[in-house]
Image (tube, rainbow, N blue to C red):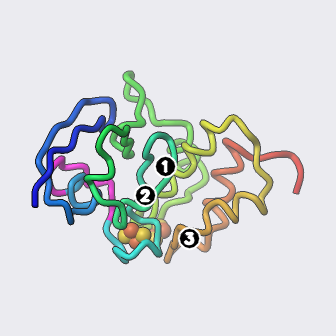
Amino acid sequence: MFKTVRMTVNGKAVELAVDERESLTDTLRERLGLTSVKKGCEVGECGACTVLIDGVSKNSCIYLTVWADGHEIITVEGIRGKNGLLHPVQQAFVDEAAIQCGFCTPGLILTGVELVNSGKKYSRAELRERISGHLCRCTGYENILRALEKVVGSESD
Ligand code: FES
Ligand code: FES
């Protein structure tokens, strides 16, 4: 069964007919060409497919596109400023060399954007907890935590 879905993706209104079983990952990657959204485990375990839905980070592989009807989706393609500058979270990842193969990076960046948008500051322990849904095979997490601390870190801890 196909259903028409209307949503906002990276600030643009999108309307398309989707199979009711289609995941948001597939819609974003295969139909809209937003390949920053990565496919890892596809069962909600690794965080590679993370997108922001109404500002909240979610695993798009276990989120049906039909559920996105009426909602606002942001992927990494949607966070750069009009002047082309990197988002502060992206810049912090570059500055702290928090990227190796980069497969986990878009998801972590979007979780970082969610944290920045919360307006709060986070201790290292809190940041560890907040990124616990993201698996990185490469970095050992230290540089990722340093990057996040640069933008949302608190003095404590
Ligand atoms: S691909 Fe979605 S959580 Fe792993
Ligand atoms: S940088 Fe390779 S998986 Fe994280």
Q: From mark 3 to mark 1, how far is it between C-alphas?
A: 18 Å
Q: Amino acid at mark 1?
A: Leu
Q: Of the residues shown, which amino acid type is indicated by label 2?
A: Thr
Q: Which mark is residue 110?
A: 1
Residue name at image x 73 percent, y 39 percent: 120
What's the mark number on residue 139?
3
* Position of residue 117 measured from the top left corner of the image (x, y, whole percent): 60, 36
* Mark 3 or mark 1: whose residue is earlier in sequence: 1
Q: Earlier in the sequence, mark 2 or mark 1?
A: 2
**In the depicted structure, whether residue 69 falls above or below residue 37:** above
Indicate the secondary structure of the residue bearing disc 2.
Answer: strand
The spot of residue 30 in percent (x, y) is 16, 57
Camera-nearest label, 2 or 3: 2
The span shown in magenta is: 30-38
Quadrant (top left, top right, bottom left, bottom right) of the N terminus: bottom left
Specify whether 130 is left or right of 78: right
Q: Is mark 3 within 8 Å of ligand 2?
A: yes
Please say if 115 is above or below 135. Answer: above
Give the residue at the far right of this rendering: 156
Identify residue for label 2. 50
Label 2 beta carbon within 8 A of ligand 1: yes
Disc 2 to disc 1: CB gap under 8 Å: yes
Crowd band around label 3 with a 10 angstrom C-alpha radius: few (<14), some (14–19), many (20+): some
